[in-house]
Amino acid sequence: MSWVSERHLVAAISNAGGFGVIACGSMSPDLLAREIAGTQALTQKPFGVNLITMHPQLDDLVRVCVEAKVGHVVLAGGIPPGNAVRAVKDGGAKLIAFTPALVLARRLVRSGVDALVIEGSEAGGHIGPVSLTVLAQEILPHVREVPVFVAGGLGRGDAILAYLEMGASGAQLGTRFAATTDSIAHANFKRAFIRANARDALPSVQLDERFPVIPVRGLVNEGTKRFLAHQAETLRKFQAGELTKDAAQLDIEHFWAGALRRAVIDGDVENGSVMAGQSVGMVTAEQSVAEVMVELVEQALTALVARAGPIS
Ligand SMILES: Cc1cc2nc3c(=O)[nH]c(=O)nc-3n(C[C@H](O)[C@H](O)[C@H](O)COP(=O)(O)O)c2cc1C
């Protein structure tokens, strides 16, 4: 969760019994090193770092993690390159990767990945096309070699429990933590989360298949409407010969540059990118991370007790 999952939220999650993960996003290696040190100053508990594989300085970022003795590195945003996998493992850290399908899960296990995340299309941020309900059925019964974590649309402990019973080792939640009191997100960002329903968190729309748009789930706002108009205008310019295909594609990709920061940090929730999962409907108040954790565990315990039946 770029901009959101920084030292305060990460430390709060790890201190509350979860496993916080710093979202490196587009941070430079120096900035990441400072963020890791800042997190280590706030918690004695383990935490991880999420690196985006497209980052031009991926190798340097991995080195920063290894030097800072970060125990777990998550490689997100595509199939992890072999040299990054080796660098993480040789550095002594555990490697976690996302898998969108069973064949890829098997390949990742063979390449030495220590754990997998399956993230359904219900999630906030960049998403694939398949729901967690289906991914879980396709992947959980067949991957036993490494722990598999489930993500996407999870807002309650009893739902998490159901996936644990299906074979998951844990769950990754983003949306439920983004609007907590421990999150540094702008008050407008948190208010937008508290007000929103599941149906407000929609994937970005691609207007023309010649100009692919990576699907991102977020709250609909003026920005998402302007993105459609921007694609239409870019398409018109391409058809009129005013733009080459490459220039038009770049123009579309640049529309959202800096937009997540605009929403999370500046509080411009009308024009920025308010990435949120469908679980946003279950964010109804600004709670602390510790309160959310207790709630999730209690919901899971209540469900477990109910499964056990009456005590005779
Ligand atoms: C605001 C926001 C930003 C995110 N950024 C990232 C990211 O940088 N890297 C990543 O792997 N996942 C990112 N995600 C996805 C989360 O890591 C997590 O898988 C997802 O939030 C789980 O689904 P949920 O939102 O329904 O809880 C982001 C999610 C949100 C809501």
Image (cartoon, rainbow, N blue to C red):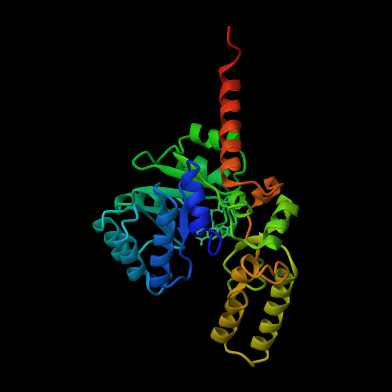
In the image, taking residue 233 as reference, residue 51 lies left or right, namely left
| Quarter of the picture holding the C terminus | top right
Q: Quadrant of ligand 1?
A: bottom right
> Percent from the top left, x then y, of residue 160?
55, 38
**Total count of labels:** 0
Specify whether 240 is left or right of 129: right
Picture layout, residue 142 above or below residue 268: above
Frontmost residue, 284 versus 100: 284
Give coordinates of residue 88: x percent, y percent.
30, 59
> Residue at 66% of width from left, 51% of height from top?
278
Q: Residue at x 73, y 69 (%)?
A: 270
Q: Is residue 265 visible?
A: yes
Identify the image quadrant of residue 230.
bottom right
Residue 250 percent coordinates (x, y)? 56, 81
What residue lies at 52% left-to-right and 37% top-to-bottom? Answer: 163
Q: Does residue 22 lie above or below 157 as drawn?
A: below
Residue 129, picture quadrant: bottom right
Foreground residue among 125 and 235: 125
